[in-house]
Image (cartoon, helix red, strand yellow):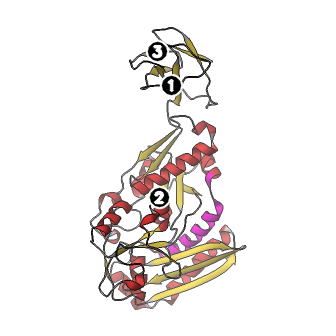
Amino acid sequence: DTHARSPRRQRPVHITMAAMMSAAAVSARVAPAASGKKMSARSSSFSAAMPKAAKRVNASVKSRGAMRVVAEVDEPIVKIGTRGSPLALAQAYMTRDLLKKNFPELAEDGALEICIIKTTGDKVLDQPLADIGGKGLFTRELDVALLDGRIDIAVHSMKDVPTYLPEGTILPCMLPREDVRDAFISVKYDDLSELPDGALVGTASLRRQSQLLNKFPTLECVNFRGNVQSRIRKLQEGVVDCTLLAIAGLNRMDMTQHATKILDTDVMLPAVAQGAIGIACRTGDEKQLGFLAELNHEETRIGVECERAFLAALDGSCRTPIAAHAHKVGDKLEFRGLIASLDGKEILETSREGEWSFESGQAIGADAGAELKTKAPAEFFAMLIENGGNW
């Protein structure tokens, strides 16, 4: 046991510590149970500083000078990098809580630190993603912070992650996938079919735009960016008639009351990796790889990497309307994917069924992407290029 002493009463208080890493230094905050005055004490292993008040005193310590001690590690064991949006932070907190739950040494105060990294996609909100660089806009700065050691792991929405990873990084972990579907949100209408000609649909997603215009060609789609809260606020202010958002994000932020209707995947095929959270670390960082191996949900990883293989075969970016969904049905993998023209007038679709395994999923996705790339007429690709496509 280690003793921390109050200068006023000079009574030792015994502190029971949870098991910690052998090299970790610890600090403690100390407060008298019935006083608001600041005081400090120091021993060889502890520094002490007053919290405002102790909520309760251990029954075995009844003296007026009893102290409450909170143990902390000096340096975080894992620095978690994330964007600063409410959804990104919710996903980072989820990751933090899972690490605490699975590793006792990470449950100590100060063992985990969340580091907010502002990305290009967060800074430029008045232009479509396709006009400011497409994929990588929400991950590039996190990659740099990971490689230069400012963070140890990076938490990503997988649909923001390019199909290539920067050299020196690896993405070994995906958390259990949320609902992949999109939600229709409107304060005026209950269903897409109720929208009148010329209704304004707020969306920054070319995937959603092309599929909507294919079914409802008289709608008008306008650029609609910002975090979930700001988009819903704009909708309520009447800037647009409706918008579409991933139900996964609404679920994670307890905002599902805003969803007017959840759209089946037959109506709106989701984005590649929609609803999935991926966690990256540095290649060869065995400590972080060990933590992430415990959190990885292999079923999610197999499905998402199948979809990403499809995307890679098409060389897709934010400038190209591409959608895909791979999932487990029984002991089989079922895949469906599409590519569309920007105006929605032409959609090419394909589907596959195969063995449920990582290798099979990769092969299925790549083969499906190659098929659609071969089937699409030259003018189809030319139209995409003319409108900013990246093939």
99 is higher (above) or lower (below) than 192: above
Cα distance in 3D space between marks 3 and 1 = 11 Å
Query: Residue at 41% of width from left, 82% of height from top?
Result: 192
Give coordinates of residue 187: x percent, y percent.
35, 72
Looking at the rendered structure, the number of numbered marks drawn on it comes to 3
- The CA span between labels 3 and 2 is 43 Å
Q: Earlier in the sequence, mark 1 or mark 2?
A: 1
Residue at 53% in and 78% down: 265
Task: Write the start and end of the magenta stretch as one range.
Answer: 295-317
Secondary structure beneath dot 2 equals loop
Q: Tell which circle, 3 or 2, labels the residue nearer the N-terminal end.
A: 3
Residue picked out by circle 2: 254
Q: Mark yes or no: residue 227 visible.
A: no
Q: Is residue 364 magenta?
A: no
Q: Is residue 301 magenta?
A: yes
Residue nearest the viewer, comparing 355 with 259: 259
At label 3, counting other C-alpha atoms closer than 10 Å, the crowd grade (few under 14, some 14-19, many 20 or more) is some
Name the residue beneath numbered marker 3.
41
Q: Nearer the viewer, mark 1 or mark 2?
A: 2
Percent from the top left, x then y, of residue 116? 40, 48
Give the amino acid type for the residue marked by disc 3 in the picture: Ala
Residue at the farthest right position: 331
Give the labeled residue for mark 1: 27
Distance from Cα at disc 1 to Cα at disc 2? 36 Å
Q: Quadrant of residue 177?
A: bottom right
Q: Residue at 33% across / 88% down in the picture?
A: 218
